[in-house]
Amino acid sequence: AQSVAQPEDQVNVAEGNPLTVKCTYSVSGNPYLFWYVQYPNRGLQFLLKYITGDNLVKGSYGFEAEFNKSQTSFHLKKPSALVSDSALYFCAVRDLSNDYKLSFGAGTTVTVRA
Amino acid sequence: ETGVTQTPRHLVMGMTNKKSLKCEQHLGHNAMYWYKQSAKKPLELMFVYSLEERVENNSVPSRFSPECPNSSHLFLHLHTLQPEDSALYLCASSQDGAVPYNEQFFGPGTRLTVL
C-alpha cells in the first residue's frame, strides 16, 4: 500500500524567508512523487515531480523539492517566499503496484505574511 | 486551468434531487478521474476511466454514477445524496493513466452542497 504524510497542517513564514513544506511517503517499490498547489476556489495545479535520477527536482514558480530515499521524504522548498505563495499544498505518491491510484496527503496550508 | 473545465461551479441540491456534474478536458488525454475533496482530509479517488473504460471504482456508493461517453467528457450523475456528500468534486485528466509518473491536470471543481 502507498501513503503520504504531511506532518504540518499549517506553515507560516515571512516574505523573503525560506519556505519548507514537509512530506514523507510509504510505498512498496520505487516511488513517483508529486507536489500540487491549490489556490482558493481553484483546482490543483501541478508544481513538480520526482521520477528517478537527480534527488533535487526543480519545478514551477521557483519551487524545488529534495528526494531523500533513506528518510523516505520529499520536502518542498522555496528559497525566498512571496505573499502570493500562500495556498494549500499537497504531496502525492504513486508506485507500480497500484495501476491508477495517486495517493494524496491531507495538505499543508502555507501563509506568507508581508 | 482552461485545459480541464467543470460545470457547474456551484450546486445546491436536496436529498431527493437528481443532478449531474460535467467535466471536459481539452488536452488530448485518454484518462479521466473523479475526486472528492473534503475539508482537512486527503483527496479521495472515486472513479478512473482509461480509454473510456472504467478501470477503478474506489468503493463509492451507488448514489454516485459516472459516465464517460468519450475521452474528452466525463459526467458524475448524482441521485438521493446525503448531507455528508457535500464537498468539492474535482475532475482530472492525464495521458496514459497506467503510467505512474504522468501528472494529472485538475479542473476548478464543483462545490456541492446537499441540504
Image (spheres, rainbow, N blue to C red):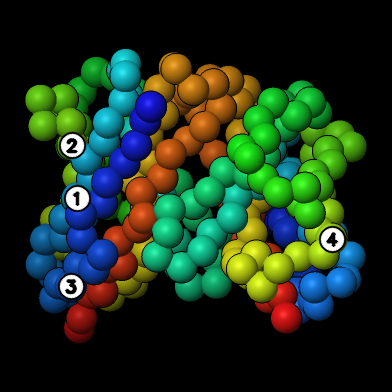
Tell me what residue is drawn at x 84 percent, y 42 percent.
B67
Q: Pick whichever of labels 3 and 1 is earlier in the sequence.
A: 3
Q: Position of residue B41 (x, y in %)?
A: 42, 59
Q: CA distance from mark 3 to mark 1?
A: 13 Å
Query: Label 3 vs label 2: CA separation?
Result: 21 Å
Chain designation of label 1? A
Q: Of the two numbered discs 1 and 2 on the same chain, state the one appearing first in sequence.
A: 1
What residue is at 60 percent from the left and 26 percent from the top? B97
Residue B76 in view: no
Helix or strand or loop: what does disc 4 sit on?
strand
Q: Amino acid at mark 4?
A: His
- Residue A83: where, in percent of width, then height? 27, 75
**Mark 1 lies on residue:** A22
Q: Do dots 3 and 2 share one subunit?
A: yes
Residue at the disc numbered 2: A73
Label 2 is found on which chain of the structure? A
Subunit ID for the residue under disc 4:
B
Name which residue lies at 59% across and 55% down.
B36
**How would you rate the neighbour count of disc 3 (Cα within 10 Å): few for under 14, some for 14-19, many for 20 or more?**
few
Q: Which residue is mark 3?
A: A12
Query: Residue at coordinates 31% horizontally, 25% vertically from top-left?
Result: A27
Q: Which image quadrant for residue B20?
A: bottom right
Q: Chain of mark 3?
A: A
Disc 1 with disc 2 on a shared chain: yes
Q: Name the front one of labels 3 and 2.
A: 2
Q: Nearer the viewer, mark 2 or mark 4?
A: 4
Query: Relative to residue A2, is residue B111 depicted above or below?
Result: below
